[in-house]
Amino acid sequence: MKEQTGFDVAIAGAGASGLAAAVTAAGAGARVLLMERMDRVGKKILATGNGRCNLTNLEISARHYHTRDRAALAEMLAQMPAQKTLSFFEGLGLLCSMPEDGKIYPYCFQASMVLDCLLAAIRRRRVCTALKFDVAAVEPRGRDFAVLSVDGRCVTARCVILAGGGLAAPKLGGTGGLYQVARDLGHTVTPLYPCLVPIKCKNAFAGGLKGIRVRARGVLTCAGRRLGEQTGEWLFTDYGLSGIPALQLSCLLWKLDAPYEIQIDFFPDWKPERLAALLDARRGICETLEEWLLGTVPKRVGYAVMKSVGLAPLSRPVAGVDAAQTAALVRALKGWTFEVTGPLSWEQAQTTGGGVPLSEIDPETCMSRRRRGLFLTGELLDAAGNCGGYNLHWAWNTGILAGQAAVQMARRDRID
């Protein structure tokens, strides 16, 4: 067995969190080894933000995340203002853009530039890298740890940071292998589920709407209980619903055996009475059903919604629609129901829900409460963010916290 020894910090996973940890620890003088299962580092970073890399968001708060321990999450986020992320990247020479919507990107809007700056930083700080290093186990050895790879390599270090990704986007390296390593070291892992993923739905009348985008509000319910809502541009697909609002609501699909539904409101700013008055007023200018909703919602959407409440054929005169049918159309336009059958798949997911409970790490350092010298960061933890830079913000900053704490621990132990 080939063994490398003498490292202060060994980091498993060279994604956003692992790179941030490596830059931070090595910048403080630690001898750092960065291990990556793939044949290159930072591959997933290149795909973030549609290739533009949404680094963070000016509005960082727990309400933009999904976790089973909101109090612990809020405590951790209090240490992670957006300015901390900006300062980190400005220190690497990356110029950032701060548009009005709060989403922060590199000034050039290129994810590749973010990765280039991180790679330049680890080179300057003499970080050692081990590619195609698939971690099989982490074993305590006295005051140190031994990190063993599937192919028989061994690394020893004073501190270990588990910074691997979750199960999302397996083509970009997501395998979730480090969850088992965390379990073997005494941690629990809450049930894992895909987040920020399109939603599979059933609606007997929406089959012909593939590719249509519409601005609307969607309300997610479970057994009649309102779980959340999102307003924005929805995309109808052959399997159900997509678009940023659908991705956000997917993070609430924790129990797929429960009867979830999404009600789409095509007039979110209108009260039902106002919509009913509009439909009544249009009777005077519209002869047929084909014209009744023309100019209000996309044509095919209007036709499908009318058909779902029995208003057909399109050649039918509007004058023949009675009050009960008009009321049914108003209800459908304010809440067209889709039966949720589940998230699309891990392949389309952007992040992982669930993970190691936040109660099992120190909120100030990300060090394990179960094993001194072990740190857990990023997607391994039970915290999944919404779209808008929140997941990268979490990844960078948990990596920074762990990197800072690991090098301090290694220094203290050398003195002792």
Image (cartoon, rainbow, N blue to C red):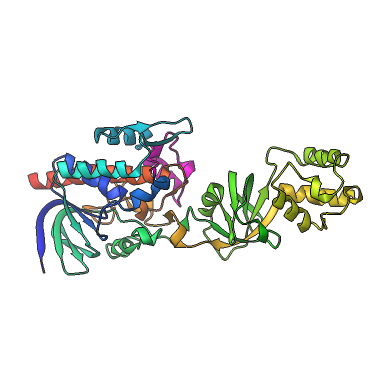
Query: In the visual, does 107 lie left or right of 409?
Result: right
Looking at the image, which residue is at 89% across and 50% down? 317
Give coordinates of residue 411: x percent, y percent.
13, 44
For the question of whether residue 193 can be seen, the reply is: no
Looking at the image, which residue is at 58% across and 45% down? 233
Nearer the observer, 154 or 314: 314
Give coordinates of residue 375: x percent, y percent.
26, 52
Looking at the image, which residue is at 78% across and 37% down? 274
Query: In the visual, does 304 lie left or right of 346?
Result: right
- Taking the magenta stretch, the answer to whether it contains residue 2 is no
Location of residue 23 by image quarter: top left
Query: In the visual, does 402 lie left or right of 259?
Result: left
Nearer the observer, 60 or 207: 207
The mark tally for this picture is 0
Query: In the visual, does 303 lie left or right of 232?
Result: right
For the question of whether residue 13 can be seen, the reply is: yes
Nearer the observer, 236 or 262: 236
> Magenta segment range?
52-78
Give coordinates of residue 331: x percent, y percent.
76, 49
- Taking the magenta stretch, the answer to whether it contains residue 67 is yes
Looking at the image, which residue is at 87% across and 42% down? 283
Determine whether 285 is above or below 178 in the image: above
Determine whether 393 is above or below 165 in the image: above
Give coordinates of residue 352: x percent, y percent.
42, 56
Location of residue 61 by image quarter: top left
Location of residue 147 by image quarter: bottom left
